[in-house]
Amino acid sequence: MSFSMKTNYTHSPKDIEHYSTDELRDQFLMEKLFAPGDILLTYTYNDRMIFGGVTPTDSPLEIKLDKELGVEYFLQRRELGVINIGGKGSMTIDGKKEEMVKHDGYYVGMGVEHVVFESDDAADPAKFYVVSTPAHKTYPNKKLPFENALKMPIGDQEHMNKRTICKYIDASQMDTCQLQMGYTILEPGSSWNTMPAHTHARRMEVYLYIEFGAPDTRVFHFMGKPDESNHIVMSQEQAVINPSWSIHCGVGTTNYAFIWAMCGENQTYDDMDAVAMDELR
């Protein structure tokens, strides 16, 4: 097993005014999250979120972060959200084993000492997308099967943004300290997400783009201030960090899906600041 954690620093809008394409990608794009037998994480100073991929094959994997966080064990002062985007697997949470098929999610509360990830088949490994945020209180662990996710159809074919937002970790159905997490699926023939754009002045967000309609699909992810937008071209299973001051929307060459995760000042899903189309530059 190998383990790596990249540190991503915060940026002001002024910082990125003159970034080249390579500089923008280096600072905000996580190009590889899933590698067989590895744990690949990013620690962003944006609200101190940790996110990444755990891909067990022949042996179980466990995230062990103590010195890096100044704690005795990873979740001593944190909560954790998980969604499996790969083959069948399981999570063992302080000795309790839970099966995790594709698209199943899980919430793990602060204070859990051991979370062990396994795959049923090394040739078709589970791919656990993990997101962790600081916590101040312990809330109950909860399995979040895909069929139980709160589903919210939105958009229409005329605007090429017909999609279903599936809320896994959401304040309307469960308690967490600050983590929110969900999975959005675009319908065939739709390619835009979150347009018209908005910002979350009180929350940052990370997007993981997955399940592209074709191998050569790409998503153009837009970020930056509304009047100074930038874009990053995204491939399958890549993630991008959006600071709270940044717009976040994207358009794909075919349909796709993405996992979103947020944390920050509040958990009010609709607390966003809309950007009028004529304000975009």
Image (cartoon, rainbow, N blue to C red):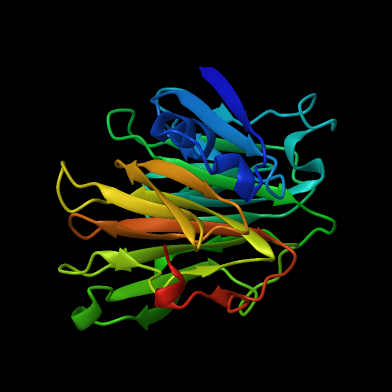
Q: Quadrant of residue 272?
A: bottom right
Q: Which residue is pictured at 44% across the width and 56% down the height? A: 259
Residue 268 place in picture, x, y as percent: 66, 76
266 left or right of 170?
right
Q: Is residue 104 above or below residue 16?
A: below
Looking at the image, is 192 positioned above or below residue 212?
A: below
Question: Residue 206: horizontal and vertical position, in percent?
Answer: 52, 51
Compared with 39, 15 (above or below) is below
Q: Residue 228: where, in percent of width, then height?
A: 48, 56
In terms of depth relative to the viewer, which is nearer, 61 or 77?
Answer: 77
Residue 144 visible in image: yes
User: Residue at 59% across / 71% down in the picture?
Assistant: 170
Q: Using the rendered image of the protein, determine whether residue 100 is visible from the camera's viewpoint.
A: no
State the residue at coordinates (64%, 36%).
Answer: 43
Q: Is residue 93 left or right of residue 19?
A: right
Residue extending farthest to the top is 2
Q: How many marks do you count on the picture?
A: 0
In this view, 187 is above or below 137:
below
Q: Is residue 252 left or right of residue 188?
A: right
| Residue 184 in the image, given as x and y percentages of width and height | 38, 65
Q: Which of 200/263 is in front?
A: 200
Q: Quadrant of the C terminus?
A: bottom left
* Front position in the image: 54 or 238: 238
Between 180 and 105, the residue placed more toward the observer is 180
User: At 75% across and 65% down in the image, what residue appears?
Assistant: 265
